[in-house]
Image (cartoon, rainbow, N blue to C red):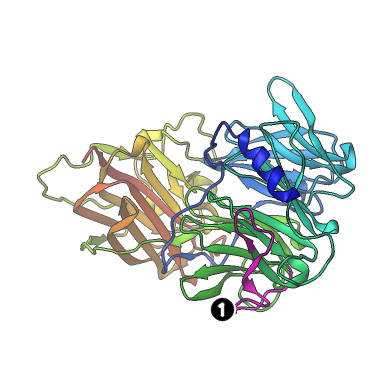
């Protein structure tokens, strides 16, 4: 009865429902991610042991550096812009960021509590009333009712408290304090997630399982791992989990060095599936936490390798309609005449005259030519003469590229539809590179095509009827290395991108 009376008391003070500040993308059964990750942060910014990461809906990335007490803020669409906040905190292991940019973080070894950080012209760190513990809070989550949850790993419990009323008491929402594997107990839990129905998911590391505690219940159900009714996969110390838009689980299976995804009929490995740990781009070593960005890309803190890895979403559609694209391959620049009833190429994107453009390489900024750009870099081809980039030159010395072999996504500002008319494309380092273009409208592929690219000649891709598009996605895989070129990767270069906004 004590639990019920306290829980009802805190409900009396709920005066505001908050929108979620994290990303829960919509995926489909055929969604897939690049098996090779891109390192977005290494030991210089993550510290020796990178544990937690948070990504908000603006794709701002918050990283805790335990080694020096800093919080690193990276802006995903502007790789050159990073903010460093020095907090002088010791061994902080978890954080959560609200829509109001309030940062809640573990400050056990500095203040003995969980604290709130407000960043204005100065930095203010305030301990949260009644959240002083005997053990460290290894994960933090805030639900839509502004209730904060804390994992007390050493106490084998999850506790919660309302942030709306400072005088509310702490409530135990999972675990008895005794380590065990029953439905009411936990053993060294770590990551937690609370859905919008206030159901609590717990990565119960010591029991190799994921526990679900329905709202108001202290008896959990095993939904993945050891003891689950539908055990389609084994777990070994799961440490973090997130839910997608359909409440399917994505789990960091730490001791198996991989990431697991839930489907309608069970679970399957999607990242780190080589059955071995390591430092290669397709491997992980003791991964710890996981987050999505708004595009559906997956970010993993690769603790044992002292880095944070990004795995690009490659395919994400429920249905596709194929339209034939015409192809014209040349040994230099190419032009193609396309007859349409709409204006042709009202916007020609050449990647020169970009605001703040350097003489080497940089990020194509959002709003350039009224478009938003993800994983798109401009490159002065004079810096890489031993490459295929020179064959894609348009009007200047610059081309665009998917630096690091990532997925390029281009969308219109404010969601306005546009038509794709043509593009000049070339492989940077490999012949027979398989380049794929997908044109989307409201998340559904409308046009799709795959082409073999080479480094010795450019290819002009043209479409006279590719209208009503809101996102263009380009990927590349495979290919064979070319002797004499400076590098060996799946980068491609492109220029003379023709689109017509509003069509």
Measured along the vertical axis of the image, is residue 29 above or below residue 441? below
Instruction: Report the predominant secondary structure element of the magenta stretch.
Output: loop
As displayed, is residue 329 above or below residue 403? below
Name, please, the residue furthest toward the top: 121
Helix, strand or loop for disc 1: loop
**Residue in front for this viewpoint, 291 or 243:** 243
Q: x, y percentage for residue 49?
A: 80, 54
Residue 128 x %, y %: 78, 34
Image quarter of residue 73: top right
Query: Is residue 370 something that shows in the picture?
Result: yes
* Count of picture labels: 1
Q: Position of residue 259 (x, y in %)?
A: 61, 67
| Residue at screen point 44% across, 52% down | 408
Query: What residue sits right under mark 1 in the picture?
Result: 230
Which sits in the foreground, 318 or 169?
Answer: 169
Q: At which x and y percent is residue 195?
A: 56, 52
Q: Quadrant of the C terminus?
A: top left
Callout 1 environment at 10 Å: few (<14), some (14 to 19), or many (20+)? some
Q: Residue at x 52, y 41 (%)?
A: 57
Q: Is residue 213 magenta?
A: yes
Q: Is residue 179 above or below residue 159?
A: below
Residue situated in front as seen by the camera: 291 or 112: 112
Region of the chain picked out in magenta, as a range: 212-237
Q: Residue at x 67, y 44 (%)?
A: 7
Whether residue 457 is visible, yes or no, is no
Residue toward you, 160 or 458: 160
Left/right placement of residue 119 relative to residue 365 reads right
Name the residue rendered at 83%, 59% in the picture: 177
Verify whether residue 386 appears in magenta: no
């Amino acid at each position: 009865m004590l639990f019920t009376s306290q829980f009802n008391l805190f409900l009396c003070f709920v005066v505001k429902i908050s929108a979620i500040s994290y990303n829960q993308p919509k995926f489909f059964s055929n969604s897939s991610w690049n098996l090779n990750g891109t390192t977005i942060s290494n030991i210089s910014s993550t510290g020796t042991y990178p544990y937690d990461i948070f990504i908000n809906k603006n794709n701002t990335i918050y990283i805790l550096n335990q080694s020096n007490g800093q919080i690193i803020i990276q802006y995903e669409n502007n790789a050159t812009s990073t903010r460093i906040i020095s907090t002088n905190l010791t061994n902080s292991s978890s954080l959560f960021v609200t829509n109001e940019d309030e940062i809640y973080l573990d400050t056990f070894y500095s203040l003995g509590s969980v604290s709130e950080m407000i960043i204005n012209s100065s930095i203010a760190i305030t301990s949260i009333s009644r959240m002083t513990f005997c053990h460290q809070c290894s994960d933090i989550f805030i639900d839509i009712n502004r209730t904060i949850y804390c994992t007390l790993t050493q106490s084998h419990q999850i506790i919660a408290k309302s942030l709306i009323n400072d005088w509310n008491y702490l409530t135990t929402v999972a675990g008895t304090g005794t380590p065990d594997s029953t439905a009411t107990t936990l053993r060294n839990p770590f990551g937690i997630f609370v859905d919008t129905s206030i159901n609590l998911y717990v990565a119960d590391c010591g029991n190799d399982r994921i526990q679900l505690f329905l709202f108001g219940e202290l008896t959990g159900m095993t939904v993945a791992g050891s003891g689950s009714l539908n055990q389609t996969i084994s777990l070994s110390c799961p440490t973090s989990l997130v839910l997608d838009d359909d409440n399917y689980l994505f789990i960091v299976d730490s001791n198996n060095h991989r990431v697991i995804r839930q489907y309608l009929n069970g679970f399957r490995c999607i990242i780190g599936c080589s059955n071995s740990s390591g430092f290669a781009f397709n491997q992980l070593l003791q991964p710890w936490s996981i987050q999505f960005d708004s595009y559906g890309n997956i970010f993993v803190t690769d603790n044992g390798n002292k880095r944070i890895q990004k795995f690009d979403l490659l395919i994400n559609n429920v249905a596709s309609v194929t339209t034939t694209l015409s192809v014209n391959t040349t040994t230099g620049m190419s032009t193609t005449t396309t007859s349409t009833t709409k204006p042709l190429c009202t916007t020609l994107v050449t990647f020169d005259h970009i605001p703040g453009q350097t003489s080497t390489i940089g990020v194509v900024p959002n709003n350039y030519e009224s478009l938003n750009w993800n994983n798109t870099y401009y490159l002065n081809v004079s810096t890489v003469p031993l490459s295929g980039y020179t064959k894609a030159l348009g009007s200047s010395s610059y081309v665009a590229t998917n630096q690091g072999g990532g997925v390029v996504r281009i969308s219109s500002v404010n969601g306005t539809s546009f038509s794709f008319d043509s593009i000049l494309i070339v492989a940077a380092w490999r012949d027979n590179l398989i380049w794929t273009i997908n044109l989307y409208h409201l998340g559904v592929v409308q046009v799709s095509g795959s082409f073999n690219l080479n480094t010795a000649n450019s290819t002009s891709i043209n479409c006279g009827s590719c209208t009503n598009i809101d996102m263009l996605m380009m990927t590349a895989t495979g290919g064979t290395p070319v002797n004499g070129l400076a590098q060996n990767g799946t980068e491609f270069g492109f220029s003379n991108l023709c689109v017509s906004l509003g069509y």
